[in-house]
Image: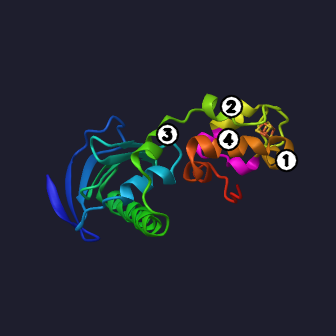
Amino acid sequence: MKAGIVNDFKIRVTSSKCPLPRFSITIEALSPEPLGDAVKILAFKFPPSKAIYSQEQRAVTLRIFDRMIGIYENGLITFCAENLEEAKNLLKKIVKIIREAQKEAIVKGVPDIRELEKWSKLNPLELYNYLPKANCGKCGEKTCIAFAAKVLSGEKKLEDCNLLRENKYSNLVKKMIEKYGNRIVEALGWKKITY
Ligand code: SF4
């Protein structure tokens, strides 16, 4: 086991417990201060398929940078890495994302636990209920259900469905906001909410 300081984080390096053979080490990095509510913001910065918030663990698990990264409110960050150099570079990227989340927490406030639960439970079939179901292909997907899956994987934005702006379908977004709230609908890629 090795230990050291990287970017003010105390890091502990152990042999990999990760399933992928390319990862040879596991990193535990402890922030000099707790990360607190920024962790909840992080759950919203990524689509539900890439971020799971656990109230019990007070942590978010992100599926980014080709691996799972655990970020805890107490300041602990855990992930697998190929080697120490790769781990240091990755830690810098993770810290950048966390700092952005901390700024967002100040500007937008922190999501409550009900919002986080709704966010993590969203699935393509639920989202499909709020799409025009026209299967017109204008968003680049052949069907609305395929579009819903792409929105939830972060590959498309809700705004990519132009039909949702037409009077005929505008009620769908209103209903979505009533059910999920502005924050979730914005996180799905609907930026200009005027309802
Ligand atoms: S543009 Fe909208 S209505 Fe058309 S296929 Fe895509 S999601 Fe469905």
Gap between marks 2 and 3, in whole Å? 15 Å
The residue type indicated by label 4 comes to: Lys
* Mark before the other along the chain sequence, 1 or 3: 3
Gap between marks 1 and 3, in whole Å? 27 Å
From the viewer's perspective, tell me whether residue 138 is left or right of residue 10. right
* Mark before the other along the chain sequence, 2 or 1: 2
Q: How many marks?
A: 4
Query: Which quadrant of the structure image shows residue 38?
Result: bottom left
Residue at which label 2 appears: 129
Residue at which label 4 appears: 175
Q: Residue at x 45, y 66 (%)?
A: 100
Mark 3 burial class by Cα count in 10 Å: few <14, some 14-19, many 20+: some
* Mark before the other along the chain sequence, 2 or 4: 2
Query: Which of these two is toward me, 8 or 138?
Result: 138
The residue type indicated by label 3 comes to: Lys
Q: Residue at x 53, y 45 (%)?
A: 47
Residue 105 drawn above or below residue 187: below
The residue type indicated by label 2 comes to: Asn
Marking on residue 100 = none
- Note whether ligand 1 is within 8 Å of mark 4: no
Mark 1 burial class by Cα count in 10 Å: few <14, some 14-19, many 20+: few
Q: Secondary structure at mark 3?
A: helix
Mark 2 burial class by Cα count in 10 Å: few <14, some 14-19, many 20+: some
